[in-house]
């Protein structure tokens, strides 16, 4: 039995990069058939976008912007070229954000991640992600069926009925949140129900600490996690190496400085930005608001694609100070106006009953003149006064946090 879904997983990274960016201009031209993308890409020579450096010049589309844009131009905000009837399924997720599912096998690219978790043809899979309005259930369902698995569309909740399904169909695999798998296992133990058929799991949608992984393993279940979203499907997945998450094939993942579209140096924490090479529904530089960091080297499992550390927090750190919102984009603008600065962090505290802002900035050459200039830029950009405190290069934490709200209220 092969350890890999296909030969693409072990190809030379340079070959993969050439294949991705060789296809990208065609995908960009397809995306420009949608009016909103056409407006965003106007004036850009799409045929020249054949590298990461060139791709980084295209403005990011922030997921947080989608609800307002879609509301202004229902249902997809002008980012989808085809009519609703040209898709197989139509969903809505909290926001609300409307998502179409193309008429293709494994439209969410989940089969590869399920395979890495040990799912195989002929397995019976208990899928406890929701099938109601949101795509979660169908993301796992379509990938499992593409592998040749039989899927029990259980959905979440109703543990008594879940026990009946498990005892009747004897599923060997589970899809759902790690929390609900624990609920099932604890409930089965308390009520003497037999769920021993479950031997592997693909979990997502909630934190999966090693302590919970070890608990599942002690009960004979090898559980792996995936990073997936309702608009993109599978972005990255865990393998038997358990060394971060391997990025899925046929997508381009960038890690950018929060509030910008500028890629961070390898290893730095930043915001995840994804471009899909799906001609049916292209998505170009969608900034998800989640933080991660790229890992160096290759996975010991043999897969050669980029790896990420998994979910490391949220990038959308907007904070209200003295009644006004301060956003990561504004802090990034200060950095653009002062390229001699390194990492920046805006710290918000309280002095008595007053909000206080302090911009922490890395620099190799601190001076009073630079402090005054940066302070003036802070006031111009944020419309609020704040102090400036310098730190030596590498001193500020590499955690992707741009705004730290440290206020404490009695």
Image (tube, rainbow, N blue to C red):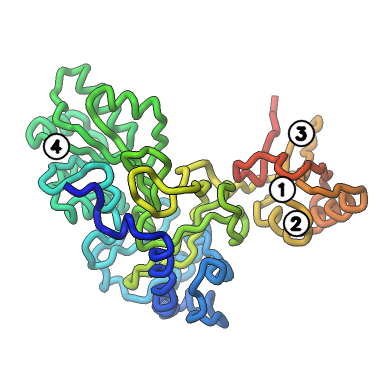
Q: Nearer the viewer, residue 269 or 34?
A: 269
Q: Residues within 10 Å of mark 4 (few under 14, many from 20)?
A: many
Badge 2 or badge 4: first in the primary sequence: 4
Q: Could you tell me how far apart the alpha carbons at marks 3 and 1 are, in whole angstroms?
A: 20 Å
The circle on residue 350 is: 3
Q: Could you tell me how far apart the alpha carbons at marks 3 and 2 are, in whole angstroms?
A: 23 Å
Badge 4 or badge 1: first in the primary sequence: 4
Instruction: Name the element at disc 4.
Output: loop
User: Which residue is denoted by mark 1 in the rendering?
Assistant: 344
Q: Could you tell me how far apart the alpha carbons at marks 3 and 4 are, in whole angstroms?
A: 55 Å
Left or right position of 84 against 21: left
Badge 2 or badge 1: first in the primary sequence: 2
**Residue contact at pointers 4 and 1, CB within 8 angstroms:** no
Left or right position of 92 against 221: right
The circle on residue 171 is: 4
Where's residue 26, x and y in %? 40, 78
Name the image quarter holding residue 193: top left
Where's residue 114, x and y in %? 26, 47
Where's residue 317, x and y in %? 61, 46
The residue at the point 82 percent across, 54 percent down is 379
Up-down relation of residue 152 to residue 21 (above or below): above
């Amino acid at each position: 039995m092969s350890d890999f879904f296909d030969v693409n997983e072990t190809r030379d990274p340079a070959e993969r990069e050439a294949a991705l960016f060789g296809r990208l201009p065609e995908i960009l031209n397809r995306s420009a058939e949608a009016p909103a993308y056409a407006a965003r890409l106007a004036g850009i020579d799409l045929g020249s976008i054949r590298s990461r450096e060139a791709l980084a010049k295209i403005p990011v589309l922030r997921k947080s912007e989608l609800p307002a844009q879609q509301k202004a131009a229902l249902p997809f905000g002008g980012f989808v070229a085809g009519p609703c009837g040209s898709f197989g399924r139509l969903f809505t997720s909290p926001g609300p954000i409307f998502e179409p599912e193309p008429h293709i096998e494994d439209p969410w690219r989940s089969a590869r991640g399920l395979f890495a978790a040990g799912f195989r043809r002929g397995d019976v899979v208990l899928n406890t992600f929701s099938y109601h309005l949101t795509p979660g259930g169908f993301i796992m369902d379509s990938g499992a069926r593409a592998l040749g698995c039989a899927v029990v569309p259980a959905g979440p909740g109703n543990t008594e009925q879940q026990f009946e399904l498990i005892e009747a169909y004897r599923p060997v695999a589970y899809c759902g949140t790690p929390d609900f798998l624990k609920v099932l296992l604890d409930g089965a133990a308390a009520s003497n129900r037999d769920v021993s058929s479950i031997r592997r799991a693909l979990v997502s949608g909630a934190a999966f600490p090693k302590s919970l992984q070890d608990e599942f393993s002690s009960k004979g279940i090898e559980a792996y996690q995936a990073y997936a979203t309702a608009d993109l499907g599978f972005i990255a997945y865990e393998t038997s190496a358990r060394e971060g998450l391997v990025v899925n094939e046929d997508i381009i993942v960038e890690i950018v400085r929060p509030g910008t579209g500028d890629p961070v140096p390898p290893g730095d924490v930043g915001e995840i930005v994804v471009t899909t090479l799906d001609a049916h529904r292209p998505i170009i530089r969608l900034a998800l608001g989640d933080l991660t960091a790229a890992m160096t080297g290759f996975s010991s499992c043999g897969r050669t694609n980029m790896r990420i550390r998994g979910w490391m927090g949220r990038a959308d750190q907007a904070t209200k100070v003295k009644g006004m919102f301060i956003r990561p984009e504004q802090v990034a603008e200060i950095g653009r106006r002062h390229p001699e600065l390194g990492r920046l962090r805006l710290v918000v505290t309280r002095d008595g009953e007053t909000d206080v802002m302090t911009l922490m900035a890395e620099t190799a050459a601190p001076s009073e003149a630079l402090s005054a200039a940066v302070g003036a830029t802070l006031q111009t950009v944020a419309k609020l006064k704040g102090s400036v405190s310098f730190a030596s290069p590498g001193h500020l934490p590499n955690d992707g946090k741009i705004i730290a709200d440290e206020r404490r209220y009695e």
